[in-house]
Image (tube, grey):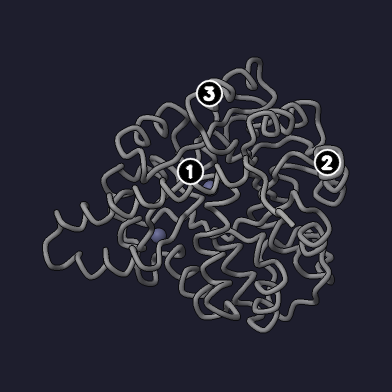
Amino acid sequence: MKVSSPGHSERQQRQLNRRKFLSLSAGAASGACMTGCEALSESTAAQPIIDIHQHVGYNGRPNDVLVDHQRAMGVRRTILLPAGRSVTTTSTHGSVSNGLQAKCLGNQACYELAKKHPHKFPFGANEVPDIEGAAAEIEKYLKLGAVVIGEQKFGVECDSPEMQRLYELAAEYRVPILMHWQYKMYNYGFERFHKMLEKYPRTIFVGHAQTWWANIDKNHENQAVLYPKGKVTPGGITDRYLSDYPNMYGDLSAGSGLNAFTRDEDHARGFFQRHQDKLIYGSDCNDLVGSGAACQGSQTIAVVRRLAPNKAIERKLLYENAQRVFSI
Ligand SMILES: [Zn+2]
Ligand SMILES: [Zn+2]
């Protein structure tokens, strides 16, 4: 029986060519390095990492420091997620949420850094969803090659007409939409989001942040607790969304992701096992170093390496799922 259509194999060929090109450019780059970074280049070439969650201008971090931070973490490719424009609306909590509440820069800044390093930095397209022209602004950057819509981090109902317009746009351009879930702050109505997952089966949703990760636990009752500790009982809302909906994925980034895995390591091993095709590494850290205690992104990489049940699953979480889901 023939299992892959001609379209499928063409895409595989394109990906192979692209991979070949990227490994050649990685080799060329390491040639330019002095002794100190050769070892790192070799190890990252052998075990590349994709980071799907970083920001330009994050709390004022300069671009060269961001580039070095990603290199220090051993990341080969990094998706730059823009903020929306700065406006004073209810959805930005009167401007509190401008710059993704962390001074992050918008579409143009991400696009420009991406253009300088086209293979290192794929970029996203974003806008405050409920302002005039939001979809058009996002579409402009999708046409320029954005690989994701987001980070959507605004005070709106998850099933509002504005958000549904973005879900449609994501499906139309075949890019995922990445959402920051935070109780009473960003993307309201997590418990009824399954209706959107059902209504937009062609849209790929990527969940991120406190409310997303707190709800791996079936016993998570007080939604005001954003970083719950202790043992996890499987079957929380997040666990079910990942199991029940083929279009729902999880972004491992931020302190909320790290907390979700370290609070109960036995649970994390099983969670990585059962959602091995759905979980995607991201860092979302704003430190200047890219290693050690200050860098939560590199700690998350270490936790994935330690708790992934086997090497194949580790590679999926740190690289292969991102490559497939974001077509990069
Ligand atoms: Zn972020
Ligand atoms: Zn870091």
Q: How far apart are marks 1 and 2 (CA)?
A: 32 Å
Q: In 3D space, how far apart are the residues under numbered discs 3 and 2 (Cα atoms)?
A: 25 Å
Neighbour tally class for label 3: few under 14, some 14-19, many 20 plus, Cα within 10 Å: few
Dot 1: what SS?
Answer: helix
Task: Classify 10 Å Cα crowding around label 1: few (below 14), some (14-19), many (20 and above).
Answer: few
Residue lying at the far front in this picture: please name it.
Answer: 1
Residue at mark 2:
196
- Residue placed at 78% from the left, 64% from the top? 239
Give the residue number, with chain letter if any, for mark 3. 143
Comes first in the chain, label 1 or label 2:
1
Q: Which residue lies furthest to the top in this view?
A: 132
Horizontal side, residue 227 vs residue 108: left or right: right
Q: From the Cβ of disc 3, is ligand 1 less than 8 Å away?
A: no
Q: Which of marks 3 and 1 is nearer the N terminus?
A: 1
**Callout in the foreground (3, 1):** 1
Q: Residue 184: image x %, image y %?
A: 75, 46
Quarter-wise, where is residue 212 in the image?
bottom right
The residue carrying pointer 2 sits among few (fewer than 14), some (14 to 19) or many (20 or more) residues within 10 Å by Cα, namely some
Residue 14 got which mark? Answer: 1
Q: Distance between the residues labelled 3 and 1?
A: 20 Å
At numbered mark 2, what does the secondary structure look like: helix, strand or loop? helix
Tell me the residue at 60%/24% (across/down): 88
Q: Is residue 303 shown left or right of residue 24?
A: right
- Residue at position x 72%, y 71% from top? 274
Residue in the image at 69% along x and 49% along y: 181
Q: What residue type is labelled 3?
A: Lys
Q: Position of residue 238 (x, y in %)?
A: 77, 60
> Which residue type does callout 2 highlight?
Met
